[in-house]
Each structure stands twice: as C-alpha cells, then as structure tokens.
Amino acid sequence: MRPNGKQTGSLEKVTKRENTTACPDVASIQVRQMVLTSRPISEPRHQPVLPPVNKGRTSLMEDAHPGHVPHPPSENKGEESHAKLTTKQEEPEEKVSLHTNRGIPSNLREEKMTFYQSNCTYNPQFTYSTKNPPSVPPEYRKASDKFLDVAIAIIKKTLKKYGSYERFQDVTGGRPLQKDEISKAVQRYLQKVGCSDEIKVCITKDKLCVASMATVNRRGKLTINASVARERWLEGTLCHEIGTHYYRSMNNMKQPWGQGRKKYGMQPVNPTEEGFATLNTVLLRDEPYLCKVALLYYAAYKASSLSFSELYQDLSAYVKDPDTLWYICMLVKKGLTDTSQPGCNSKSQVYLEGVLQLLRHRQTIDFQLLMALGKISFEDVVRLKHIARIKGARMPQFLRDKHEYMKRLEHIMKINGITDAALRRLIDS
C-alpha cells in the first residue's frame, strides 16, 4: 500500500463536473423513506432515499432473460427439495432486521440522516445491537494498490463511453425493479436451471451488498437487495450467486476436502471465488464493463487514508447519485465504528483482483474443473483434480461450452482495455 496520507493514484476527471459534493437537499430527505427505492430512469438523481418502502410501477418483466436451456434437476433433488420462493401470494416477505443483521449498524438511519444534514461533512459513528459488534477481519484491514492503475483505467474508459456512472447504470442495467418483478424473474431463472425446489429466496431492502448466497445442509438461501436490483443486471446477479457460489458449494460437498481443507494444504478460496463469480456476472452482457468492481477497488484503497466524509467527497467527482455514493462508502467502511478515522474493509478489492488473476491464467485454467471441484483456488485445481469427485457435478449453462466461454472472457478483456502484456507485468512480477 502507498504511504498514508499521500494522495497518489487519484482518478483524473474525464468529464467536467461542478466542484461540489453530491449532497442532497435535507428537506427532501425528511419527506422520504430511508433506502434506495425504485425510481424511473427519467427522474433526476439528486435526492437520496433512506429505509423502508418501495413505490410501485405497473410494468413487469414478463420475459426478462429468455434463451437459457434448463439445467437438469439434481440427482439429490428429492432430498434437497425444501423451500419455495417467497412471494406476496405465498407468504409475507422475510425481514432482515436492521437490529439483528450483524453487518448493518443499528443506527444506520439516524447516522445517514445526520450525514446529509451536515452537508455530507459528518463522519458516522456506527453502533451495533449485537453482543459482539462486527469488525474488519485482519486480512482485510489493509488495502492494496497493486491493481489501482487498472481500476482507474477501467473507470475512465467506462465514463468516457457513458459520460457518467449514473448513465452507465441506466443504459447497461436498465430500470430499477420492484419486489414482485424480482420475484417473478428469479422464479423463472430457478425453473430454467432446475433449482426451484431447493433454494429459498428472501427479497429485502435491509442489506449492504447486492445479494448473498448461503448453503446450509444442502439447502440454499438467496437474499437479494431490492434496493439495487436492475432489469438487465438481475440475470448476472443470479449467475454470480447461483451459477457460481451455489453450484460450487454443492460441488464442494462431494469432494474429499468438503469436510476439511487443512490436510490438503489448500490455498484460500478468495480471490478466486469472487473473481470467478464476477466474471460470470458480466459474462452474458453485450458490453461487460467491470466499472463497479473497479470503483470498489479504488474506493477501498482511498478509504484506507480517508475518513467517511472525505471518501464521499473524493468519489463524488465521479458518481453523482447520493445513494450510490453512500452505498459504496458503506461497503468499503463496513465493520468500522468511528468513520472519522482512516480505515477500510478491503474485501471489496478481491473481486477485481480475482478477475485479473483468472484472466491472466485463463489459457491454462480448466474453468469447468474450477466449477466442478467446488470451493477451490485456481492454483489448486491441477494438484487436486486426481482425487476429486467430478461425476454428477453441477455445471451452469453458461459454462457448458468451453469455446464460447473463452470467447466471452476475451470480449470482457477487450471491452475493459485489459491486455495480456499488462496482466503479465502486474501479476508475474
């Protein structure tokens, strides 16, 4: 990491912007709820929203992502079959309380309001109602600048193409979705891949990340953040959470190391796990820009030397929407209590790091084996494949054609301006 206090590697402005922080009019906050709600794309993006309530739209995604071949049901489908998608027609939404979710401060609403009332100069002091408040894991307390130049280059390339981060979101992500639209789209996806009887879905607004996947006793639970779900990005989210995390978890249960990794001397699963999932998130897009993970990498690096309010102001030169800025700052400051001090949660950097490592070694990686062997680093595949149990492994549709998958990886590199020469220089040195 570069010396503390030295503001090197700052992202140059690629378009002229006002020299003001993207802080909203406080009066507008007091008449709105506190969470990102779905808004029409045409609505000006200058007023934040804080939890809970989602104003509805009438249009629905009838055929959000056609063209997928259904995944054959699992051999263990009968024993795994358990949970259904939670919808308004079946049962109430399962709440993820602000006061019980360890990742979310119990005073989030109050601190966000205070932050905006201070013209975005206040540094939130987060408290947690859990007995043992969360903290940043030791391995994520320092940020790296190893791939900072790549992150900046990707951000600049994206902003040059779209003019702003908000336009990038609107054009490539489409409109925000409301809960019933998310429910229907997710149900269609689960039916196509043969998982509709084995994964329970919770749609909530009380979550810091886009989505998460948990697997307990061979049963999956997918939690989706309704505040940030978008029409054309939802499929990528499902490829990330189900097509990568869930399938690798299920495949991992069949492996010798499924009951313990230590005896096999295995490398940590990250950054491979999140890098693989991130590639699969953008894989099917026409223009698979990696701007979001590049921005998170950059933000985590800057957070290591900036307070919350300083970070918010630094990022506001490139992101205008107050809610998006708050969301990014929360992710890279997650687990901290006093945000007036420099400090970061660098977990947000593993996505881009993992992507670049996998792209660097893509010609020697068998990505189908990487999926079939479960929760494993790409570095361990060759060493452990001889003792792996591959028969009956889950394989997502997008990975069944090796040639097509490799072509899409090449496309990701081209769109983001990533070259083999740059990857060799950064990773091999």
Image: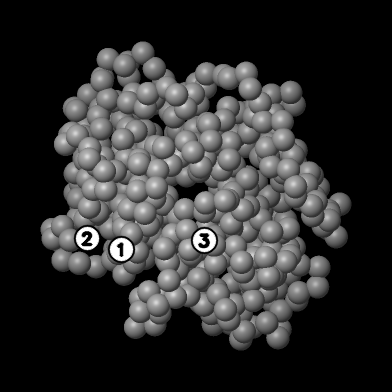
Residue at the (66%, 26%) spot, across then down: 60
| Element type at mark 1 | helix
Q: Mark 3 = which residue?
A: 412
- What colouring style does the render use? one colour
Q: Secondary structure at mark 3?
A: helix
Mark before the other along the chain sequence, 3 or 2 = 2
Please report contact status of discs 3 and 2: CB closer than 8 Å, yes or no: no
Q: Indicate which disc residue 172 carries.
A: none
Residue 70 appears in view: yes
Three-letter amino acid code at the position of disc 1: Leu
In this view, 252 is above or below 263: above
| Above or below 293: residue 27 | above
**Quadrant location of the N terminus in the rendered image:** bottom left
Measuring 76% from the left and 67% from the top, which residue is drawn there? 393
Residue 400 location (% of width, % of height): 73, 65
Q: Amino acid at mark 2?
A: Gly
Q: Earlier in the sequence, mark 1 or mark 3?
A: 1
Q: Identity of the amino acid at label 3? A: Ile
- Asked which secondary structure carries label 2, the reply is loop
Which one is nearer the viewer's eye here, 296 or 149?
149
Residue 346 shows in this picture: no
Image vertical order of residue 328 relative to residue 279, above or below: above
Cα–Cα gap, marks 3 and 2: 24 Å
Residue at the disc numbered 2: 9
List x then y, in percent, for residue 55. 52, 18
**Residue 359 placed where, x, y %?**
50, 71
Q: Disc 1, disc 2: CB below 8 Å?
A: yes
In the picture as drawn, the residue positioned furthest to the left comes out as: 5
Name the image quarter holding residue 320.
top left
* Residue ID for mark 1: 148
Residue 339 falls in image quadrant: top left
